[in-house]
Image (spheres, helix red, strand yellow):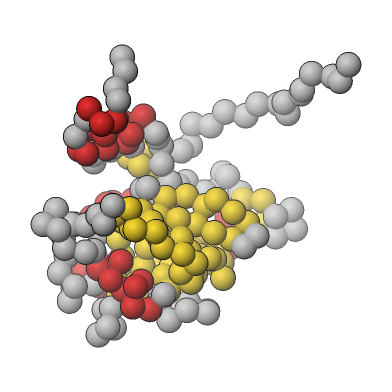
Amino acid sequence: MEYAPEDLTSRERYKVLTGFVLPRPIAWVTTIGPTGVVNAAPFSFFNVFCEDPPLCMFAANPRPDGRVKDTVVNIQRTGEFVVNLADEPLARAMHDSSGDFPPEVGEPDYLGLKLAPSTKVAVPRLADAPWAMECKTWKTIDVNGNRQLIMGEGIHFHIRDELWDAASMRVNMDRYHPVGRMFADRYCRTDDRIVFPPAEGTPAA
């Protein structure tokens, strides 16, 4: 089966991409509005893609009625945000924060999520997140006037203590249970894992 993108509607292209490119990590982005309201919204068109400097990127489309999302408005105003990751205990709250909340209602407050001050940005982080990265906007790219690619430079990391071995610089995978986005309202757990031996290339002739 084959498709040319130009033969599909935007919605159909979205379904092809999100139906097969999975599981996807989820950026649970906190921002702060002009009146101090803290916004938290999940984005699954997301990943990290560089370590020097630490860069991440997520894509934000408009709301169904065409309004720009609060996350984008807040980042455009302040140039700051925090990427929080969700694990299984936080998964339902993360999903619920994707609802249509007006700008004057902060998702963390509405959902009873605890906030903690960040170290280098004014935007709070989610206190119970297993991992969070404070970010300054590195670059934004407008895609056809209807989607923003927001790239952030990570300037400070927060890690839940029991998840990290500072001596070996390794995550304790027995204690870390992140969730991934599938499609529509479907998510996945990540505890069914496969370990392979180191790959070996063909010896040089």
Q: Picture coordinates of residue 188 (x, y %)?
A: 37, 37
Q: Position of residue 1 (x, y in %)?
A: 31, 14
Is residue 100 positioned above or below 13 on the image?
Answer: below
Outermost residue on the right side: it is 205
Name the quadrant containing residue 5. top left
Kindly give the residue lying farthest to the left in the view shown.
65
- Is residue 140 in view? yes
Compared with residue 166, is residue 116 higher up or lower down, i.e. above or below? Answer: below
Residue at 18% x, 57% y: name it. Answer: 63
Image location of residue 196, percent across then percent down: 65, 26
Asked whether residue 90 appears in the rendered view, the answer is: no
Give left or right: position of 68 versus 157. Answer: left
Query: What residue lies at 48% left-to-right and 37% top-to-bottom?
Result: 191
Residue positioned 11% across, 57% down in the render: 65
Q: How many marks?
A: 0
Q: Is residue 55 left or right of residue 33?
A: right
Residue 68 vertical position relative to residue 118 in the rendered view, above or below: above
Please tell me which residue is depicted at 86% across the width and 20% down the height of the picture. Answer: 204
The answer to which image quadrant residue 93 occupies is: bottom left
Which percent across, then down, holds residue 35?
25, 85
Q: Which quarter of the figure is the C terminus placed in?
A: top right
Q: State left or right for residue 114 relative to residue 67.
A: right
- Please state if 139 lies on the left or on the right of 35 as rendered: right
| In the foreground, 158 or 163 | 158
Q: 131 or 11: nearer the eye? A: 11
Quarter assignment of residue 29: bottom left
- Looking at the image, is 148 positioned above or below residue 190? below
